[in-house]
Image: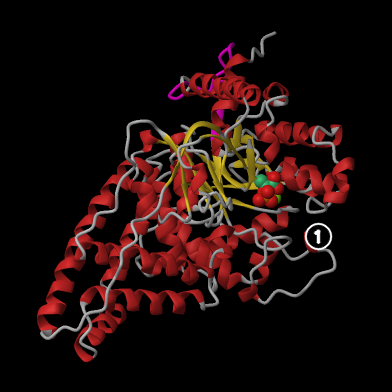
Amino acid sequence: MLIYQGKSVFGGIAIGKIKIWKKEPVNVKRTHIKDCDAEYLRFTEAKAKAIAQLKKLQKKALEEVGKDNAAIFDIHILMLEDADYLDAIKSMICTQSLNAEYAVMLAAQNFSKMFSAMNDAYMQARATDVKDISDRVINILSDISQSKISGDEPVILVADELTPSQTVQFDKSRILAFVTSKGSLNSHTAILARTMNIPAIIGVDIYENNYADGKMGIVDGYTGNVYIEPEEEFLSQMKTKLDEQLKKRELLQLLKGKEDITLDGKKIKLYANMGNIKDLPLVLFNDAEGIGLFRSEFIYLESDTAPGEEEQFAIYKTVAETMAGKKVIIRTLDIGADKKVEYLGLKEEENPALGLRGIRLCFKRQEIFKTQLRALLRASVYGNISVMYPMIISLDEIHKIKAIVSEVASELSSQKIPFAIPEQGIMIETPASVMVSDKLAKEVSFFSIGTNDLSQYTLAIDRQNEQLDDFFDPHSEAVLKMIEMTVKSAHDAGIWVGICGELAADTSLTEKFLRMGVDELSVSPSMVLSVRKKIRETNLSK
Ligand code: PEP
Ligand code: MG
C-alpha cells in the first residue's frame, strides 16, 4: 500500500478507483498566415463560441453551486472581452502574421506571467484564469473538446491542477473525491469542492505516477491521506468508517427542513456563521435558519485597500437577498489583534489582543466605520439585516455608536438615498460587558455571546498561543457563569440572547445552554445539522 499525505480541503472518506485525469495536450503549431483580417475573424468567432460555452457553464454552476461560485465564469467572460488581451492577440496575428492558435497561446503565456508577478493575491490567481480561457479558445480553434471521464464507475479524480471551469464541468455523480498536486486552500476550485460536498485533498503528487491510474484508492479527507492499493484489512476498516459516515450524513440530511425545537416544545434559533460571501451556499446547503455572525472584516482582510461603500453594499445586499427574509446578522469590522491589514497603517502593539481592535478601531477611524454603516443601512432595505458591534465594554460606547448611526442616517436621508435602520445588537465577549450586561441590555435589541474572546479574556489565555492549550478548559465554570449571567440580564430586559463563538457547536453543552435559556446558537455551516439533532433530542422539562 502506498500512502500520500496532503492538505485537506474538505473532509470525508472516499473509496474507489483512481483516475489520473490529464488534459489533452494541445500541440499548438506556429504557422505563417497571409490574410490577417480573415485570421482575426477566425479568432473572434472562436471567442464568441467560448463565451457561449462559459454562459452555459455559468448556468450549470448557478444551479449546482450557487450565485457566488458561478461568478468566476463572469470573470472569465470579462477576461475574454478584455481590450488589452484582444489587442495583444490582434497585434500578433497582424504584425507577426501568426496563426490565431499560436497568438492566443503566446498572449496567455505573457498575461499569465504578468499576473503571477503581481504583488496581489487576487491578481496572481488570475494567472490560472487567463490560461483557462485561452485553452478554451485554442481548443475551439483546433476543434478539440476536452474529454470527460470515460466509463460509468465513479472515480477518485487525480489531477495536476483543476481550474474552476473544469471542476464544474465534471458530472458530480461520477466523482468520489478530488486529489490535486497544485491548488490552494482558498482557490475557487477548493471552494467549489467544499460546496459540492466532495472530499478533496491538495498538495499530493500522485498525478505524475501513472502506475496509480485504475488502481484501488482511499481518500481520507479528514486526515489529508491518500492510500493506493490498500491492504485488505485496512480497506475493510475504512469501508466501515465510510458506512458510518454515510449513515450519519443520511440521518442528518433527514433533519433538513425540520424545526429547531426541543422535545418539550422550546423553539431555538439555529443560525450559521460565515466569514466570507463564498460561504453562503454552505449556509443554504446545511439549512441554517439564518446567519448569526457574518464576520465582515474578511471583506477588509481580502482587500489591498479599504473596501468602499459600493463594494460593501453589493455584498451585504446579495447576502440579504439570497437569504430571502431570513435573519442576517452582520458584525461590523473586527480588525485588530490577529486580524491585520497593512493599509490601515496600525502600529505594532505589545499586547494586540488587548489593543486597538473591534469597536475601538471604529471610533478612532470613524471614516471607515461610517462607510461600513452607510453600506449596511442601505442594504437593510433589501432583507432582514441586523447589525452587531464587537468588543463592547461600556454603556458609553453604545451611546457613541447610536450617535454615529443617526449621523449616517441623516446624511443618507438628506442625500435622498434609500435606507433602513436595522435591528442592532452587541457581542458580549469581554468580562466588562458581562458585568454591565444589565445596563447594556436596556439599550440594544439582542446579545450574541462570543465565547472565543470571552474565554480568552476571562481566563487570561491568549487564544493565539498554542503553548497555553493545556491550561485552556473550554468548559470552564467561570465562562459558563458569565454566559448564565448574560442570559439573565438579557431576559430581564426582554431581549433575546445567542452564542456565536465556537462553544455554540459543542453538543456536549447544548442542553446546558438551553437550560440557561439561550435563545439562539450560531455555528459553522457544517455543524448546523448535528446541533439540530441535539436540540431535537433534548427535553428541558425533565
Ligand atoms: C468570539 O470571539 O467568540 C467570536 C465569535 O468572534 P471572533 O472569533 O471572530 O473573535
Ligand atoms: Mg471575538
Residue 497 horizontal/vertical position (percent): 64, 35
> In the rendered view, does 419 fall on the left or right side of 426?
left
Q: Nearer the viewer, residue 105 or 189?
A: 105
**Colour convention:** secondary structure
Dot 1 alpha-carbon crowd within 10 angstroms: few under 14, some 14 to 19, many 20 or more? few
Q: Secondary structure at mark 1?
A: helix
The magenta region covers 256-271
Magenta residues, dominant SS class? loop
Q: Would residue 187 be seen by someone viewing this image from the given angle? A: yes
Kindly identify which residue carries mark 1.
354
In which quadrant will I find the C terminus? top right
Q: Nearer the viewer, residue 353 or 471?
A: 471
Look at 60% across and 31% down and name the residue there. 230
Q: Residue furthest bottom?
A: 95
Residue 44 horizontal/vertical position (percent): 16, 72
Is residue 474 depicted above or below 96 in this figure? above
Is residue 185 depicted above or below 362 in this figure? above
